Amino acid sequence: MTQQPTHDALVDAVRAAWQRWDPPPPDLADTILVGLAMADLDADYELLTLVSRHDHLAGTRAAPADTQRVLIEFRSGELTVLVRVSQDQPAGAHRLDGWVSPATGGEVTVVQGDRSTTVDLDTNGRFAVPGTGPGLTQLIVRPATHAEASDFRTTLFEI
């Protein structure tokens, strides 16, 4: 009676056969990375890049209400968006205060799932959105100085 090969021995034999008869091209990984970069699969990642997120100021004394604030910064090329998320009334709601630099007029849309709220950017690049619920959130910034095709979108962030 012959002894059956172990699972590991079978896997090793199959691996050796594939490497011998159909090896992957040596530049496969690089070719895939270049293809993905050129395909621009994640058009959303032309969006603004999350630069930083601070849940509180390090080394400072803060009142309990201050610990409910989050500061998030996004950057794309020449545009920077700074957003402060703070607890708002009624309970569970949040207020978004934001600044767009360079300062420009225009509008900002806050998107959460099927809901969206659009507010104006003042000429100093400031905006405020009270009563924002918790959840995944995205900002769409439409500066007055840019065409509609060049809207800036943030990555999704959690409130």
Image: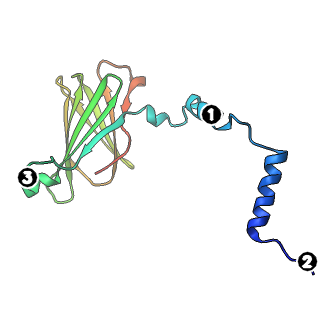
Q: Callout 3, which amino acid?
A: Ala
Disc 3 marks which residue? Answer: 62
How would you rate the neighbour count of disc 1 (Cα within 10 Å): few for under 14, some for 14-19, many for 20 or more? few
- Looking at the rendered structure, the kind of residue marked 1 is Asp
Density class for disc 3 (Cα within 10 Å; few <14, some 14-19, many ≥20) is: few
Is disc 1 placed on a helix, strand or loop?
helix
In the displayed structure, does residue 20 sit left or right of residue 49?
right
Amino acid at circle 2: Thr
**Residue 94 % position (x, y):** 20, 51
Which residue in the protein does label 2 denote? Answer: 2
In front: label 3 or label 2: 2
Q: Which mark is residue 30?
A: 1
Q: Is residue 108 left or right of residue 24?
A: left
Percent of width and height locating residue 5: 82, 71
Most extreme residue toward the top is 145
CA gap between label 3 and label 2 equals: 75 Å
Could you say which is closer to the camera, residue 7 or residue 72? Answer: 7
Distance of label 3 from label 1 (alpha carbons): 49 Å
Q: Secondary structure at mark 2?
A: loop
